[in-house]
Amino acid sequence: MEGEVELSLGCLKLVLNSRERDDLEFPLVLQVLDSSTIRYLDKPTGPLVSGQIISVSDGFYKRTDCFVVLSDSRIPTFSLILIKNIDFHIKYQRNRDRVPITILGQILEYQILVNGTSIGLFSGTPISLDQFKRGSVEMRNPLAGKLWAQVKEGKCCDVTFRFPSLPGEPTVEAQMNALVAQSDVFEVLFQSAFLEKTGVVKIYDSEPKYIKSLIQFVFTQFIPLLSLKQAFEVLYLANKYLIKDLDKFCRNFIINNKAKKTLPKDVFKYMELNQKCCDDQIHDFIIQEFANHTNILIRQPKFLTLSLENVEMFFSLLNLNAQDWELLHALR
């Protein structure tokens, strides 16, 4: 799913304005930011049945208490859902903090594309539509969206990324001018005589799905990050090609990921994934996480697999959150 799933960018503006809903293109792909359980009467004389009210993001915008889903199965926070049908004629009213909130409609058909428990965070920084005034904030450059649609269809593409080390030598096509506009590295790369003649860039250190993520971000300034692995791989490419906005986008997801809210970050997994990126800010984050949760992390089996160099690095830190006898026992 990484590099393949796209959110329906900007669609919530159409959802909010009833006169523009005919322009919605189903199915919609949205990310669930929050959900709360409700009880409702399935029939006037029937028993109370469980449902939920969900808040969603389309990548660019977010809406609190947006839709009702009349289902016993709760949708995990951060999940990506594919919505096939919405009934906008059914209205719900809800009070939150003494402020009446109108639920925009009832989702009739949907499926979970990616479970939120494996994602752990919503991607990007969507603008709230709860206080949105029409015309005050516009969707990102609409031309960029049209150009991205061309790339997905293979139209007007003049550069090909080829992966010789992978079976079948898969390829990914792109538009050179867009990449040059975002990256000085691409500009230098595309000026080489060989590339001007062949239009082929050979990639040995990444995979097609991560290159697709990079290209999508170049056009839309957004990609749905579905895992830490994807975030680290795309961060590596962002560093390699010096795309600062993408670098920041991925790092924010990595550092703020909340997949396990009650436990410290798996710093050992972060260390493993960061070996390729060698990102200094994430390295500092790993160090701080270890210092904050030393007493828990030294008891994990992965601690025993650390190299002596890494053990020395961690144990040389000041203010470790562990007693001396715990550290001695872990070291032994």
Image (cartoon, rainbow, N blue to C red):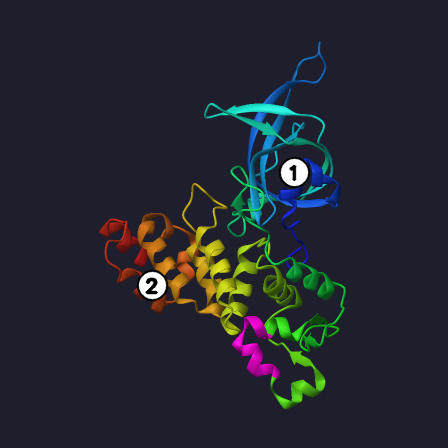
Sequence-first tag of 2 and 1: 1
From the top left corner, tell me how far across and down residue 268 is, in percent.
43, 58
Residue interval drawn in magenta: 180-190
The quadrant of the rendering that contains the N terminus is bottom right
- Which residue carries the number 1 mark? 17
Q: Amino acid at mark 1?
A: Asn
For the point 62% across and 71% down, the residue is 178
From the top left corner, tell me how far across and down residue 63 is, in percent.
56, 38
Q: Secondary structure at mark 1?
A: loop
The quadrant of the rendering that contains the C terminus is bottom left
For the point 28% across and 54% down, the residue is 327
Q: Is 38 above or below relative to 234? A: above
For the point 31% across and 61% down, the residue is 314
For the point 56% across and 54% down, the residue is 227
- Which residue carries the number 2 mark? 311
Asked if residue 187 is among those painted magenta in the image, a careful observer would answer: yes
Q: Amino acid at mark 2?
A: Val
Asked if residue 46 is among those painted magenta in the image, a careful observer would answer: no
**Considering depth in this image, is 266 or 140 the residue closer to the camera?**
140
**Considering depth in this image, is 264 or 11 the residue closer to the camera?**
11
Marks 2/1: CA–CA distance: 57 Å
- Marks 2/1 in contact by CB < 8 Å: the verdict is no
